[in-house]
Image: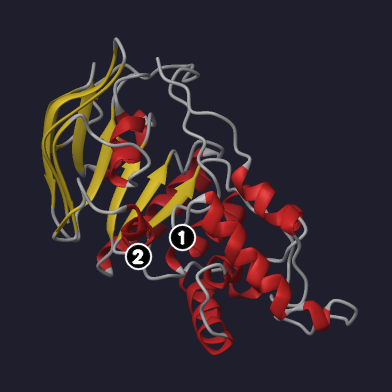
Amino acid sequence: MIVFNNVTKKYGSNVGLINASVHINSGDFVFLVGPSGAGKTTFIRLILKEIEPDSGRIILAGKDITKIRKREIPNIRQKIGMVFQDFRLLEKKTVYENVSFAMEVLHKSRKEIKERVPYVLDLVGIADKANKYPDELSAGEQQRVGIARALVNKPRVLICDEPTGNLDPITAMDIMRLLEQINVRGTTVLMVTHAKDIVDKMNKRVVAIDHGQIVRDEEGSYGFEQQKEEEDDIYIPGFTTFLDPAELRAAQAEINRKNESKRNRTAAPHDPSAYYDDSLVNTYLDGGEDVYE
């Protein structure tokens, strides 16, 4: 599913990855661990084609993505779902609308949306929260919305970036059980985490990175001292990994045009297309800068 073959990426004098090789099979559940600045963010960004390797090859779902054309990147990213530590939900939209928007920007039909979104909400255990807003939900429920949004377009791979970082221990384990269920259904799960207790308890495959090198790849424990501060390893992408900013704004503009006639009418329940504006896109895209140690 994901193959790194002697991949190197540097940022001037700073090291991202050095000669990294790893093979993640379809259906694997893998923890990606390591100290701050070890190379975990670089690993993710390379998979998402946000950056290019200096050397080596990367294969995703059987396709060599190392030298694909720019126009092919959105199709590659549609194979990937992202789950974030801070949920990234639109506060003024309901649970249903937050999830359905991920389909809207990919021009999915209303029929597909009405069939798929309720199914995914039920899958993650929040079907009864469809009409709730994020501030009416617990942190665990908000993360379930984030997972539903990541799953709604049927990705082959689910990348989870510290998905339990803002959760209490009990809720965190609930989310881990949900991710395990999703994995059992066939989705490959790659989880970046510093949560030593979770990694040790789950006893899954662990790929450990240190100073840009793969230093361990085996089932078992976390293997590093848990750090209290992770400020040097920040990854803040935009809302969607499926489209670059220009494409997302173009998709939003098309949605706006289609819905112009509806803007002065009250939206029916579960009608996510009745009102959008360009500020939503800015909310998704203005996430900050990537920081590397």
* Disc ID at residue 150: 1
Q: Quadrant of residue 254?
A: bottom right
Q: Which residue is mark 2?
A: 155
Q: Nearer the viewer, residue 157 or 179?
A: 157
Q: Position of residue 205 (x, y in %)?
A: 18, 42
Q: Position of residue 252 (x, y in %)?
A: 64, 64
Rendered-image quadrant of the N terminus: bottom left
Q: Is residue 130 visible?
A: no
Q: Position of residue 76 (x, y in %)?
A: 31, 59
Q: Is residue 177 left or right of residue 265?
A: left
Q: Which tag, 1 or 2, sits closer to the chain's start?
A: 1
Outermost residue, bottom side:
111
Helix, strand or loop at mark 2: loop
The kind of residue tagged 1 is Ala
Badges 1 and 2: C-beta atoms under 8 Å apart? yes
Residue at horizontal 58 percent and vertical 41 percent from the top? 86
* Disc ID at residue 177: none
**In the rendered image, the vertical position of residue 248 relative to residue 228, given as above or below:** below
Outermost residue, top side:
13
Q: Quadrant of residue 183?
A: bottom left
Helix, strand or loop at mark 1: helix
Q: CA distance from mark 1 to mark 2?
A: 8 Å
Q: Nearer the viewer, residue 116 or 62?
A: 62
Residue at horizontal 13 percent and vertical 55 percent from the top? 25
The kind of residue tagged 2 is Pro
